[in-house]
Amino acid sequence: PVASAAAEESRRVVIKSPMVGTLYRAPAPEAPPFVEIGQDLDVGQVVCIIEAMKLMNEIKSEIAGRVADILIENGAPVEFGQPLFVVEPR
């Protein structure tokens, strides 16, 4: 069981921030988040928005899979290359 857990862990892909800015998990304050843990993702699906210099940039998944972990809070500042989401590829 330990070996299979390690193999599963090594398959995971981290979605990282492509820019510096403020991360928003939903399109509007009252709207539900783009993704939740356990949710299936498709290539090109929006996972969050990063606001940089008053521009809203949609961050899209480059892989299909399942959201394994969310590493950042809504409204938090993010750095370039900072891990945001962990995805288990399909």
Image (cartoon, rainbow, N blue to C red):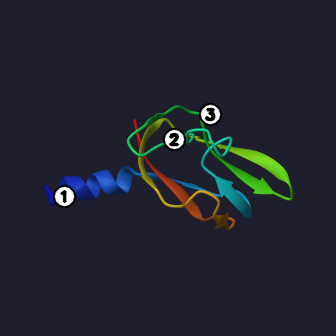
Q: Amino acid at mark 1?
A: Ala
Residue in the picture at 71% in, 60% down: 22
The residue indicated by pointer 1 is: 3
The residue indicated by pointer 2 is: 35
Image quadrant in which you'd find residue 28: top right
Image quadrant in which you'd find residue 44: top right
Sequence-wise, the earlier of marks 2 and 3 is: 2
Q: Amino acid at mark 3?
A: Gly
Q: Is residue 26 above or below residue 43?
A: below
Q: CA distance from mark 2 to mark 3?
A: 13 Å
Q: Is residue 82 left or right of residue 38?
A: right
Q: Is residue 61 left or right of residue 80?
A: left
Q: Is residue 51 above or below residue 81?
A: above
Q: Position of residue 60 (x, y in %)?
A: 64, 41
Q: CA distance from mark 1 to mark 2?
A: 29 Å
Q: Is residue 10 above or below residue 87?
A: below
Relative depth, front residue between 31 and 79: 31
Residue in the picture at 30% in, 51% down: 8
Image quadrant in which you'd find residue 84: bottom right
The residue indicated by pointer 3 is: 44
Q: Which mark identifies residue 66?
A: none
* Nearest to viewer (mark 3 / mark 1): 3
Q: Position of residue 56 (x, y in %)?
A: 79, 47
Sequence-wise, the earlier of marks 3 and 1 is: 1
User: Tag 2: Cα neighbours inside 10 Å, few (<14), some, or many (≥20)?
Assistant: some
Where is the C terminus found, in terms of image quarters? top left
Relative depth, front residue between 52 and 43: 52
Q: Secondary structure at mark 1?
A: helix
Q: Is residue 2 left or right of residue 76?
A: left
